[in-house]
Amino acid sequence: MSLKIAVVAPSSVPFVRGGAENLWWGLVESLNARADVAAELIKIPSPERNLEEIIHSYVDFARLDLLHFDQVISTKYPAWMISHPNHVIYMQHKLRGLYDTYPRHLPTTIPAKHQFPRELQSLHDFLLKPPDSRESLPEIVQILLAFLAWKDRLPPEWYAFPGAISRSIVHLLDAVGQSTPGVNRHCAISQTVANRAEYFPLQTVVEVFYHPTALQGLRTGQQQYFFTASRLDKPKRIDLIIRAWLAAEVSYPLYIAGNGPCEVDWRALAQGNPNIVFLGYVTDKQLAHYYADALAVIFVPEQEDYGLITLEAMLAGKPVITTSDAGGVTELVKHGENGWVAEPGVTALAQALKTCAASPTLAATFGATGKNWAEKVSWEALHDFLIVGLRKKLVVINTFSVYPPVSGGQLRIYHLYRWLARVWNVVLVTLVPASHASESITIAPGLQEIRIAKSHAYEKHEHQLSQKLGVSSGDIAALLYHEDIPEWGNAIKAATATANWVVLSHPYGYAALRSVYSGGFCYEAHNMEFDLKQGMLSSQGKPQRYRHELAVVEQAERACVQESTQIITCTAADRNRLIEYYGVVGKGTVIPNGVDIEGIPFISTHQRRAKHPKRLRVLFMGSLHLPNIHALEYILSIAEQCSNLDFVIAGSVCHAVNTQTSLPHNLTLLNVVSDEDKLGLLGNCDISLNPMAAGSGSNLKVLEAAASGQLIVSTRFGARGGVLMEGRDYIAQELEEIPTFLCELTSQQLLSYADVVDSAYQQIKQHSDWKALAEDFKMALQPLNTMGSTLLT
């Protein structure tokens, strides 16, 4: 049965065809070319010549009933007023004249409440504080219609468009239309749109995806002229192109396609020069022809939303010449790779034209580079991104809940799969304590976590096992007692029944997975678990206490390695160890741990010292994991020796300290902290201390420290993973050397390590960004499913 999709859009009055129409028509046409979708473009005439027309347009969409469709997609105001349980906003732009291009000389403050008639005072309250749900929409519609009825009795400036009240009314309607309870996903056609102030609700995760063009017949021809195509109005800045071309004195003519209100003025600017050719309106077939024979395409709009001209030029194998303030265009054009990005002035743009005209071979090379990238932007990729029912499904089995991410394992799973969820539906099946309720929640766009509560019988066995072994043993218990949680098996069975990929994260869910699922899976090994558990258990007593349980871990890990179709490890050392120990060949991909580069502010050493010029602060963060516990015990033993420093310990590892223990005066235990407090610690502490002597995988805390700008002091084992190099990116000190180094460390010496801090940041930025690592993960999974998938953007 086909999915029924409605693309909902405004029809401009008077009608104008542009990039928005290109997207709507292309999306609907390409969807209807599929056998599994039936799509319709639904448009309502939406004049916007005055405030009254704007309000009525918003109300028309709010009253539209499209419940007979499976999903609705809106891209532009006021279409997102539509009410539907499966509504995706793929934003092109808002009414820019009331947002980012609102005239600076106009007021933004609405009149005081007492100036409103009593019948309209509730409108003042709504304008001052828009609601974050659609529940008040009927009341808002009624009060707005009443406001229009008062037009002849209120000051004319209240109805000015643009104006303070009209601006506030549109912001109110957009806030209600975009409210999260009424919108499943917030997406944008470019990062420029996603980043604009007030375009999306606060704290909303906005997914960005570049869409293709509906223009057909694009090809690479000759190199005969410079070409541009736009509506001839002020924001497109064709006048800048003309002035730069005249200044450049190049031999290639300038062809300008399009018409609009500025055409007369710009023809005058061209001074009748026979080599500046105004083509007027051109058909799609003619447009493709002009692209084909251009030397380069010049496109210099001011803060463009996206700029299909850019993509079309690239598909024709042409370089693009643009300016640094062109908005979405600069997301596609990379200076010196597929075009030129000049400063927005006549002189700089003229120089770019000269360089291009003097190097047609280089222009062709840039054009080929752009074409190679642009050909990957497809309608099929956009379908998979936008249409929930068409997205491939990835199921991940794990024995602990992932959100909120605090420990290293949680952070890895959350960040890797939240990026994969941009292109696939990702479902995590996890366990939570018996005191919690089983539930399914969305923890990021496209990322669902099905949390299954452990049974009381299971938790009893888990507690007994931990007492026997002397260490927390919830993971091993999952191998031994999974039958005590039948709901877990049922959830895994239901989720994997429709999965395109299955990933077993850690080996501890193996028995539960195999009890209900016999297909192929990818094994994501966070550690070499047999080595890790052997080290932990051997420190707790004689082998007879743990021999059976260790054998169970080894057996499960062996099965995971040998039965899986792909193995993912955090480090090359773990991959080599697994392959060697369990005797497998031909599989094993390293996807190292990463860091949320955009989410952690970098603060340089000099900035830290200027902010906190007195005592140096040392930070250690860790979960309640035996190697971390040993590291904490070590720090407790050396803190008093290093009386010149203040030590801060954060994370669940703090629970390992007996509450009756007397702590060194210069050491503070913070336990588990919020994300906001964690960022504060990363920004306020000067040194990240990592005295690790055991464990497997790699240390996420080291990557976060590097991303934040802390100086890393670590054992060589603690900085394993291959990203950071001792001396260049961190200070390598073994356990016996650390006290002396720290005791002698002064603020001035810390400043001398600024280059080390900067180098570590550059290494992390280049090699450890979760987004890039997720792309590598996707490519590693790709051969396991012949249906393919889309690009991460």
Image (cartoon, helix red, strand yellow):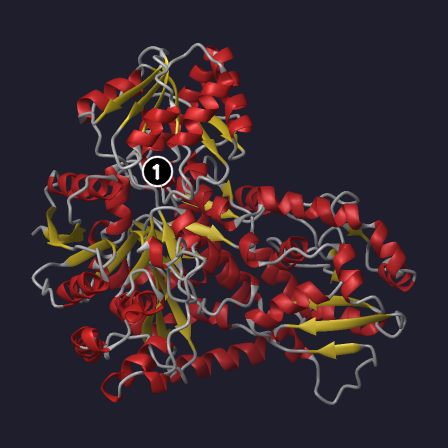
Residue under the point 26% across and 29% down: 258
Residue at image location 46% in from the left, 45% down from the top: 567
Judge by depth and name the residue closer to the eye, 704 or 199.
199
- Picture quadrant of residue 672: bottom right
Please give the residue where the numbered disc 1 appears in the rendered image.
Answer: 307
Relative to 345, 734 lies left or right: right
Q: Position of residue 209 (x, y in %)?
A: 35, 46
Position in image of residue 750 (x %, y %): 84, 56
Label 1 is placed on what type of residue?
A: Gly
Element carrying mark 1: loop
Q: Position of residue 608 (x, y in %)?
A: 75, 61
Report the front residue among 75 and 113: 113
Where residue 549 appears, as percent x and y from the top left, is: 52, 67
Please give the count of numbered marks on the rendered protein: 1
Against 596, residue 231 (above or below) is above
**Which residue shows up at 82% across the image and 59% down it?**
735
**Where does the C terminus fall, quadrant-wise?**
top left
643 or 682: nearer the eye? 682
Q: Say left or right for 650 vs 342.
A: right
Whether residue 690 can be seen here: no
Category of crowding for the residue at label 1, using alpha-carbon neighbours closer than 10 angstroms: few (below 14), some (14–19), many (at least 20):
many
The front one of 778 and 103 is 103
Residue 445 seen in this snapshot: yes
Up the image or down, 476 lies above or below 591; here it is below
